[in-house]
Amino acid sequence: MSTTTATTRTVLRAEGFSCPSCVTTIERRLGRLDGVTAVAVRFASARIEVEHDPQRVSVDDLVAAVASVGYAARPA
């Protein structure tokens, strides 16, 4: 029996970035979520790109994780 894991790329638009250290904070928080395989936060464009398994972590979970470190985000 084999199992395959499909990953999805979700792009969020973030608000409240004030410095590049915000990038690290958000990347660390999202990267700790079970089911997230890659995170890239683009400071200049305020975009958060996340590769994740939607069966394990939803878009709402991603938005909540960003909110937990003090930033607002919504699906782009």
Image: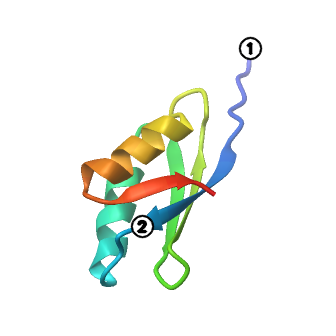
The residue labelled by disc 2 is: 15
Q: Residue 69, image x and y in percent?
A: 25, 55
Given the image, on which type of amino acid does mark 2 rest?
Answer: Glu
- Is 56 located above or below residue 62 in the figure? above
Residue 76, by quadrant, is bottom right
Q: Image height check: is 45 above or below 33? A: below
Task: Tell me the distance, in whole angstroms, between the alpha carbons under discs 1 and 2.
Answer: 44 Å
- Label 2 neighbourhood size at 10 Å, few (<14), some (14-19), many (20+)? few
Q: Earlier in the sequence, mark 1 or mark 2?
A: 1
Left or right of residue 61: residue 49: right
Asked whether, in this view, residue 18 is left or right of residue 12, the answer is left
**On-image quarter of the N terminus:** top right
Instruction: Please name the residue shown 46% across and 45% down the image.
Output: 62
Q: Amino acid at mark 1?
A: Met
Way the structure is coloured: rainbow
Which residue is painted at 73% across and 21% down in the image?
A: 2
Tell me if I can see residue 41 in this picture: yes
Residue closer to the observer: 40 or 14: 14
The x, y position of residue 30, in whole percent, is 40, 52
Residue matched to label 1: 1
Residue positioned 31% across, 73% down in the render: 22
- In this view of the protein, which residue sits in the foreground, 26 or 2? 26
Identify the element where label 1 is drawn: loop
Can see residue 32?
no
Instruction: Report whether 19 appears left or right of 75.
Output: left
Where residue 45 sits: x, y (%)? 55, 80
